């Protein structure tokens, strides 16, 4: 086992792009690890003005004056030589968004380690947090794997479990997993010479495809449980939505940020409003009902249901599947 003093001498190259990556990078910075280079995606046009914008990892690296690399890909000899010159012992890869060529995977003393937000082999792929909530999983976690040439299939160095509660959204679960992942990668870095890699199971393999905006439309014929899972999985992005009618408009898009499951014996058709007064709005589903909590009409502010109900009384939510 490495002592803490020797573990900090480990030279780390870091590769990541997202806010999840930033949180892990900051933990490594605060723990005084020797970060010799940070790899992230090139600046991309963003917003209505299409202004070139740095990713969150670049912003954090600039804040700490770390050496930054932003190659379009890692395939070129020049890019690979630049990495070799860093003399890194290990590369930590967290939501980077680039394929690492085999030469890079084999270049460093301890190879490339990936922090993945699921208990592999369940939810390999781009959206493991969202897909776990959407599927109604009760348990998820963090996997630290030794990367190989096939995405998310490497041997497992360490796994840590995390409970998914009925109130967890993608944002809240993300925050839990950041903390778990931070502890896990520090544990791995402190024990690099004493780890026993375990091959991933060949059973129960699932894939977490990237979310598409058209998945955000609610199908009210689904059960209250399924729709509730979707609302939580799609928060903070892209937020579930439905077409709605009310006493003040024929049809508008209504975004639903949060809701709760209601047990009801009422025999209403899916999408019909069971009850809407100044305090609550209950909607029938294919099985059970949902009480809307936080909503937003297209072009308006996000409101809790009490404030929304002061201005509108919903009459129907339409079944929209795209």
Image: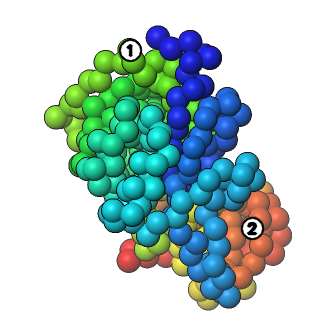
- Mark 1 or 2, nearer chain start: 1
Q: Position of residue 95 (x, y in %)?
A: 47, 51
Within the image, what quadrant is residue 158 found in?
Answer: top left
Q: Which residue is mark 1?
A: 194
Residue at mark 2: 302
Q: Residue at x 33, y 62 (%)?
A: 77
- Quick check: 104 above or below 319? above
111 relative to 205 in the view: left or right: right
* Quarter-of-image position of residue 144: top left
Q: Nearer the viewer, residue 315 or 72?
A: 72
Q: Is residue 184 visible?
A: no
Q: How many marks?
A: 2
Q: Nearer the viewer, residue 272 or 47?
A: 47
Tell whether label 2 touches label 1 (CB within 8 Å): no
At x 58%, y 72%, the residue is 43
Q: Is residue 153 left or right of residue 277?
A: left
User: Of all residues shown, which one is farthest toward the left?
Assistant: 202
Q: Position of residue 40 (x, y in %)?
A: 53, 59
Expressed as whole percent of the image width and height from the top left, the position of residue 218 reads 47, 67
- The vertical placement of 172 against 303, above or below, is above
Q: Which of these two is toward me, 211 or 20?
A: 20
**Residue at image location 65% in from the left, 73% down from the top:** 53
> Horizontal and vertical percent for residue 311?
81, 75
- Residue 176: which numbered mark, if any? none
Q: CA distance from mark 1 to mark 2?
A: 51 Å
Mark 1 crowd level (few <14, some 14–19, many ≥20, 10 Å Cα): few
- The quadrant of the rendering that contains the C terminus is bottom left
Residue drawn 74% across the image and 61% down it: 305
- Under circle 1, the secondary element is helix
Q: Is residue 206 above or below residue 69?
A: above
């Amino acid at each position: 086992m490495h002592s803490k003093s020797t573990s900090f001498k480990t030279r780390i190259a870091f590769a990541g792009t997202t806010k999840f990556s930033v949180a892990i990078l900051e933990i490594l910075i605060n723990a005084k690890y020797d970060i010799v280079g940070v790899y992230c995606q090139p600046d991309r046009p963003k917003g209505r003005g299409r202004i070139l914008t740095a990713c969150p990892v670049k912003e954090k690296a600039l804040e700490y004056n770390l050496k930054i690399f932003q190659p379009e890909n890692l395939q070129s000899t020049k890019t690979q030589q630049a990495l070799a010159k860093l003399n890194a012992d290990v590369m930590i890869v967290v939501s980077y968004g680039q394929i690492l060529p085999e030469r890079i995977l084999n270049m460093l003393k301890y190879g490339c380690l990936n922090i993945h937000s699921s208990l592999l082999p369940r939810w390999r792929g781009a959206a493991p947090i969202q897909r776990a909530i959407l599927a109604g999983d009760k348990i998820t976690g963090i996997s630290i794997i030794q990367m190989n040439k096939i995405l998310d299939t490497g041997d497992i160095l360490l796994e840590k479990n995390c409970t998914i509660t009925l109130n967890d959204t993608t944002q809240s679960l993300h925050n839990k997993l950041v903390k778990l992942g931070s502890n896990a990668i520090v544990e791995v870095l402190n024990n690099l010479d004493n780890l026993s890699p375990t091959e991933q199971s060949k059973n129960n393999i699932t894939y977490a495809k990237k979310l598409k905006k058209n998945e955000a439309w609610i199908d009210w014929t689904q059960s209250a449980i399924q729709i509730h899972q979707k609302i939580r999985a799609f928060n903070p992005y892209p937020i579930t939505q439905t077409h709605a009618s009310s006493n003040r408009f024929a049809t508008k898009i209504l975004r639903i940020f949060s809701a709760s499951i209601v047990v009801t014996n009422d025999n209403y058709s899916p999408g019909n409003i069971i009850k809407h007064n100044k305090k609550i709005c209950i909607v029938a589903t294919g099985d059970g009902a949902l009480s809307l909590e936080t909503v937003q009409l297209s072009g308006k502010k996000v409101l809790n249901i009490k404030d929304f109900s002061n201005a509108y009384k919903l009459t129907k939510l339409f079944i929209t599947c795209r």
